[in-house]
Image (cartoon, grey):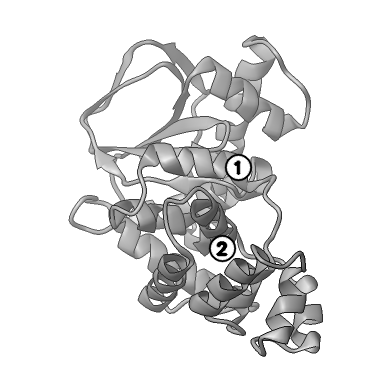
């Protein structure tokens, strides 16, 4: 899951805007992996060496790997290995930013190194190490300075992000959490977990259509009762899994209220509320969370 936070990292550093991120995410899915980006990620070549090969390609009609071998930057064995590799999502995103001219390959190399160093990211395979990294990222993301109930919010958001990856797609970026006593909504589905929290998904109709298509793996073209039911079902499923986790791990029994639909109203609660924008290529989802107590 740590790849989802790279876009947030770039926005916070002022490297790109939210609008640029949304455009890059739309392009990312159809972008062909470049051997130069793979070589940087694998540590076989520096960004400057990659740029040398790209410049050389403007003079010779030859493939990247062939020229990199000729210049002594790669061996043929390394070229063959790179051709079998898959880039992680944060490198794919970085490649799009380079192609758009918003950053250079040198910028990408330095930013990725800083990002990986900040969170001690390595090529993780063990589920326990993955979870420790996710907890670290979320602890930083949900800092106590802007969230009063971070110890309760972190496991809830961990499950939420996992469910987005599992049921909707992993090509999303969470933006900064905003404490808001009242949240104006467009099309909003909310659900309360008795004496625990209120959560809601708010989005524009076209985004809801795309969200529903992803969730049920069917093609919807209109904002109708099937789209509405799909968004309701996702939120209910997510909260149901959270209730099961709380029961199994903490012996806490939670009751779910039926999902409620609101349109063009203001969502407000007496408890602290937080707005978490989630950016997908198909649009922006506003996730709203209000925690009532331990």
* Residue 36, image x, y percentages: 63, 70
* Residue 132, image x, y percentages: 48, 74
Furthest-front residue in this view: 59
**Front-most of residues 30 and 242:** 30
**Front-most of residues 253 and 48:** 48
The residue labelled by disc 2 is 91
Q: Which residue: 62% across, 80% down?
A: 42
* Quadrant housing the N terminus: bottom right
Furthest-left residue in this view: 145
Which quadrant would residue 223 be assigned to in this image?
Answer: top right
Relative height, residue 250 to residue 70 (above, below): above
Relative height, residue 158 to residue 227 (above, below): below
Relative height, residue 159 to residue 40 (above, below): above
Label whose residue precedes the other's in the sequence (2 or 1)? 1
Q: Which residue: 47% across, 32% down?
A: 285
Numbered mark located on residue 27 in the image = 1
* Residue 289, image x, y percentages: 36, 38
Relative height, residue 5 to residue 70 (above, below): above
Tally of numbered tags: 2
Left or right of 182 in this view: 21: right
Q: Is residue 191 in view?
A: no
Q: Are marks 2 and 1 in contact (CB under 8 Å)?
A: no
Estimate the spatial distance between the alpha carbons at disc 2 and disc 1, rounded to whole Å.
13 Å
Left or right of 249 in this view: 33: right
Circle 2 SS class = helix
Q: How crowded is the residue under tag 1: few (<14 C-alpha within 10 Å), some, or many (20+)?
A: some
């Amino acid at each position: 899951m740590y790849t989802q936070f790279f876009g947030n990292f770039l926005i916070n550093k002022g490297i790109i805007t939210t609008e640029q991120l949304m455009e890059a995410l739309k392009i990312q899915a159809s972008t062909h992996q470049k051997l130069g980006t793979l070589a940087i990620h694998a540590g076989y070549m520096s960004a400057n060496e990659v740029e040398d090969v790209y410049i050389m390609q403007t003079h010779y009609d030859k493939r990247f790997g062939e020229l990199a071998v000729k210049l002594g930057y790669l061996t043929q064995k390394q070229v063959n290995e790179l051709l079998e590799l898959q880039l992680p999502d944060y490198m794919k995103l970085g490649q799009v930013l380079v192609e758009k001219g918003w950053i250079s390959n040198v910028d990408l190399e330095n930013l990725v190194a800083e990002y990986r160093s900040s969170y001690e990211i390595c090529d993780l395979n063990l589920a326990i190490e993955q979870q420790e990294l996710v907890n670290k990222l979320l602890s930083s993301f949900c800092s106590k300075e802007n969230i009063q109930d971070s110890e309760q919010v972190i496991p809830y958001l961990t499950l939420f992000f996992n469910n987005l990856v599992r049921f909707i797609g992993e090509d999303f970026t969470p933006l900064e959490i905003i404490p808001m006593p009242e949240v104006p909504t467009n099309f909003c589905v909310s659900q309360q977990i008795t004496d625990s929290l209120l959560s809601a998904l708010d989005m524009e109709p076209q985004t809801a259509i795309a969200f529903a298509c992803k969730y049920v793996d069917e093609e919807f073209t209109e904002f109708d009762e099937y789209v509405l039911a799909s968004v309701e079902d996702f939120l209910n499923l997510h909260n149901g899994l959270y209730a099961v986790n709380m029961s199994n791990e903490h012996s806490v029994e939670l009751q779910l209220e039926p999902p409620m639909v609101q349109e063009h109203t203001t969502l407000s609660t007496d408890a602290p509320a937080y707005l978490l924008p989630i950016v997908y290529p198909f649009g922006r989802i506003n996730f709203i969370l209000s925690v009532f107590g331990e």
